[in-house]
Image (tube, rainbow, N blue to C red):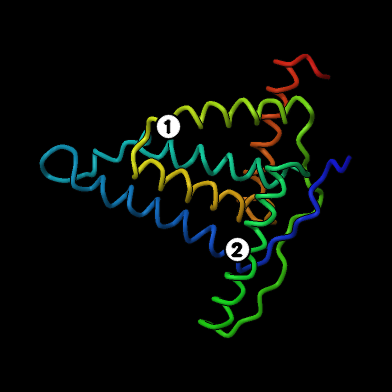
Amino acid sequence: MNTVTSATVSLGAVTIGLSILSWHLTRWWKGGSKAGPPGGGGGGRDPKLLIPFLSSVALGMLCVTAAGGLLGTAATMLLGLGNTLGNWSLTAVTGTATPGVTRSGHIALTPGGSAALVIYIVGLAAIWKSGGKVFHGKVTSGVTCGVMLGLSAGFSGVAAAAVVSIFNAFGDKVTGVM
């Protein structure tokens, strides 16, 4: 069984992921400026509003590190689509080359981490059933963002490595796999 994904990420896919992240953070920031006390200050920028999006970004990052199965295969296919569309858009818009930006030394999910991922997906699926259109849009774009950024060599790749490490530690402790 393969334990580490062989997927690669290009600058185009990372650009798509960062664009999605920028979109959601900007809308959250701008939307919060209307709320709060009179006189401005943006007191309405509630971090809790980012939970659906950021939790689904973490899910995307975890899925792209899964080496196989349905999750790994689906995430790798989505990443391949993101590579193709992102490379095309960067080349068409700016005329620049799109190098690979995959980080070296992938971190893989342990068996316990994989179990924690399945439990996490079941929890998100239960929440998904009760969510509306806006929630579904945040989750879908968050998973896409996480898949595009999960293997990158930049800061987002470091964040993905931290998420995987946390899931591995949690899953190993809860399931008793060491």
Label 1 Cα neighbours within 10 Å, binned few <14 / some 14-19 / many ≥20: few
Q: Which residue is at the far right?
A: 1
Question: Which of these two is toward me, 114 or 163?
Answer: 114
Pinpoint residue 104: horizontal percent, then vertical percent. Answer: 80, 54
Mark 2 lies on residue: 82
**Left or right, 130 with reference to 44:** right
Determine which of the numbered discs, if any, sits on residue 59 in the image.
none
Pinpoint residue 9: horizontal percent, then vertical percent. Answer: 69, 61
Which numbered mark, 2 or 1, is in the foreground of this view? 1
**Left or right, 34 with reference to 142:** left
Pinpoint residue 20: horizontal percent, then vertical percent. Answer: 47, 57
Pinpoint residue 166: horizontal percent, then vertical percent. Answer: 67, 30
**Left or right, 76 with reference to 47:** right
Task: State the residue at coordinates (48%, 41%).
Answer: 54
**20 relative to 91, above or below:** above
- Pointer 2 and pointer 1: residues touching (CB < 8 Å)? no
Q: Which residue is at the far bottom?
A: 95
Question: Which of these two is toward me, 105 or 171?
Answer: 171
Q: Amino acid at mark 1?
A: Lys
Q: CA distance from mark 2 to mark 1?
A: 27 Å
**43 relative to 83, above or below:** above
The image quadrant of residue 165 is top right
Q: Amino acid at mark 2?
A: Gly
Disc 2, SS: helix
Task: State the residue at coordinates (63%, 44%).
Answer: 61
The first of marks 2 and 1 along the sequence is: 2
Task: State the residue at coordinates (14%, 37%).
Answer: 37
Disc 1, SS: helix
Mark 1 lies on residue: 129
